[in-house]
Image: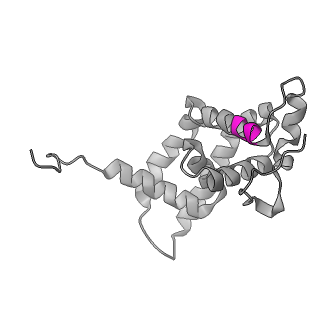
Amino acid sequence: PVFVVPEGSTNLPNNSTMADVMSSQEEANQDAPEQTDLEKAIHILALIEDFCSGPEFLAGIQDMISQHAGKFHDREEDHPHEWYELYQEYSSRVESVLENFMEEQNLSSDDLVALCSWARSALPNALFSIDYLAASMEYESFVQLMLDWKNLNVYQVPPEPPWPE
């Protein structure tokens, strides 16, 4: 069956369809019972989420994030060149960590981009891994990830509860 974008979710790059993403998956699942397009996309996203929540993926990127997040601060424009160099390094790390997983799942880089793009528009804030993956594909998302990481690490719990006792 041809995989189409679920109703109302057409924000895929370069006018791609989910058929592009799913074509390689169909061969691997020929003996599996028929699934809807949405079920297929959710299944693949669940596999990605599981992998990206695991130690192999997290160990590959969290050291870099924690080491460099302190260098980032809110700026509208004129980002230091070092930030872009760190983005390139982060993208390379994510790509190398994902390489075997994507090969095992028969996913291309374009497939991953299309799935992430669809998930971000159709299921915002539903998946932990999407922010990490988007940060490897978009510079602005990378900067936001670094700022979020930095803000989480400097946050301190107030000594007293904010409500009266």
Is 40 in the magenta? yes
Q: Residue drawn 50% across and 59% down?
A: 144
The location of residue 141, given as percent across then percent down, is 57, 59
The location of residue 98, given as percent across then percent down, is 69, 39
Which residue is farthest top? 31
Asked whether residue 89 is in view, the answer is no
Query: Camera-side residue: 31 or 116?
Result: 31
Q: Residue drawn 83% across and 42% down?
A: 22
Residue stretch rendered in magenta on the structure: 38-43
Q: Residue drawn 60% across and 37% down?
A: 52
Query: Camera-side residue: 49 or 136?
Result: 49
| Looking at the image, residue 26 lies above or below residue 78 | above
| Looking at the image, residue 98 lies above or below residue 104 | below
**Could you tell me what secondary structure mostly forms the magenta stretch?**
helix
Quarter holding the C terminus is top left
Colouring scheme, one of rainbow, by chain, secondary structure, one colour: one colour
The location of residue 159, given as percent across then percent down, is 15, 46
Is 46 in the magenta? no
| Looking at the image, residue 80 lies above or below residue 4 | below
Q: Quadrant of residue 35?
A: top right
Q: Residue drawn 62% across and 53% down?
A: 120
In the image, is 130 to the left or to the right of 73? right
